[in-house]
Image (cartoon, rainbow, N blue to C red):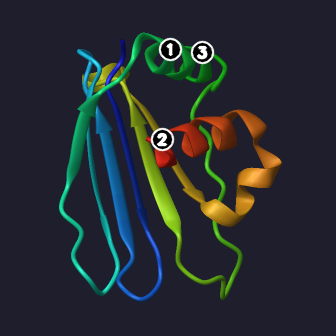
Amino acid sequence: MRPVRYRVVGQDDYMCEVRVRPSGRYRIDSGTYTTHPPREGVLTDIQAAELTGALDHLGPPREHPAPEGAPGFVAELTVGEGEGAGQYRFWEGALGDDPELKSLVRFLETL
């Protein structure tokens, strides 16, 4: 499995970072003005298959910039590692225009 790092920063100190290692182990750090302890776990076989399928359908890296004056929620997604890693930077409001990216992001957000 390819490693994945997803990070989004929003308004009012909101932040969420999801890291999935090739072994299927994951860690989620998130919070707002209050602190939430990190959550860790291991993907089930079904979740690993869903993640692999979402990654396979993702396509090449592309940007979806925020419109002028749009509020926070800019995200970064890294798939893979090293020179071959795919880097995606996007405004979460644009996910409706990219169903493959939206599917992957929603999967990561529901771990």
Tell me the quarter of the image containing the C terminus. top left
How far across and down, in percent of the image, does residue 48 sit? Answer: 44, 16
Mark sitting earlier along the chain (2/3): 3
Q: CA distance from mark 1 to mark 3?
A: 11 Å
Image side of residue 41 versus residue 72, left or right: left
Crowdedness near tag 1: few (<14), some (14–19) or many (≥20) residues, C-alpha within 10 Å: few
Mark sitting earlier along the chain (1/3): 1
Q: Residue furthest left?
A: 37
Quarter of image, res 31: bottom left
Who is closer to the viewer here, 65 or 6? 6
Which residue shows up at 21% across the image and 76% down it? Answer: 35
Image side of residue 81 versus residue 66, left or right: left
Asked whether the residues under the numbered discs 1 and 2 touch, taking CB atoms below 8 Å apart as contact, a structural biologist would say: no
Image side of residue 88 versus residue 7, left or right: right
How far across and down, in percent of the image, does residue 55 sit? Answer: 55, 22
Image side of residue 38 versus residue 74, left or right: left
Who is closer to the viewer here, 79 or 33? 33
Which residue shows up at 42% across the image and 10% down it? Answer: 45
Crowdedness near tag 2: few (<14), some (14–19) or many (≥20) residues, C-alpha within 10 Å: some
- Check disc 1 and give the amino acid type: Ile
Which residue shows up at 30% across the image and 87% down it? Answer: 33
Q: CA distance from mark 1 to mark 2?
A: 14 Å
- Check disc 3 and give the amino acid type: Gly
Marks 1, 3: nearer the viewer: 1
How far across and down, in percent of the image, does residue 95 sit? Answer: 71, 53
How far across and down, in percent of the image, does residue 22 sit? Answer: 27, 17
Asked whether the residues under the numbered discs 2 and 3 touch, taking CB atoms below 8 Å apart as contact, a structural biologist would say: no
The residue indicated by pointer 2 is 108
Marks 1, 2: nearer the viewer: 1
The residue indicated by pointer 3 is 53
- Check disc 2 and give the amino acid type: Leu
The residue indicated by pointer 1 is 46
